Amino acid sequence: MEHLYHSTDENVGLSLATRLLIHYTGDVHQPLHAAARVNDEFPKGDRGGNDLTIKPKDGTANLHAVWDSIMYS
C-alpha cells in the first residue's frame, strides 16, 4: 500500500489537503495551538497553555482547557 503522502490518487490528495486546511484554520483561531509561552518558568514552552495552571473553573485547571471550553460552549 502506497504511503498517504506519496499517493498519486487525486482523491487521497484532496482529502489530505482538506484535512490540513481544516487543521490549520483551527490553529489560527486557537492561538494556544499555534504558540508556546517560553520564559524562565517554561524554558521549553508551556505546551500551548497546558502547563499554565489557573484557578479551576468548571473542572478545568489549565489555560488551554479553559480556552477550549469557551470555544466549544
Image (cartoon, rainbow, N blue to C red):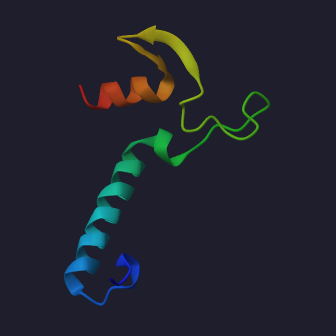
For this orientation, the residue located farthest to the left is 11
Report whether 8 appears left or right of 38. left
**How many marks do you count on the picture?**
0
Q: Residue at x 57, y 18 (%)?
A: 53
Say above or below: 72 vs 56: below
What x and y, as percent, mark residue 7? 33, 85
What x and y, as percent, mark residue 14? 24, 77
Q: Residue at x 30, y 72 (%)?
A: 17
Quadrant where the N terminus is found in the figure: bottom left
Q: Nearer the viewer, residue 26 or 5?
A: 5
Say above or below: 5 vs 72: below
What x and y, as percent, mark residue 37? 64, 37
Q: Residue at x 32, y 25 (%)?
A: 70
For this orientation, the residue located farthest to the bottom is 8
Give residue 59's quadrant in the image. Answer: top left
Quadrant where the C terminus is found in the figure: top left
For this orientation, the residue located farthest to the front is 1
Q: Residue at x 59, y 24 (%)?
A: 52
Say above or below: 69 vs 29: above
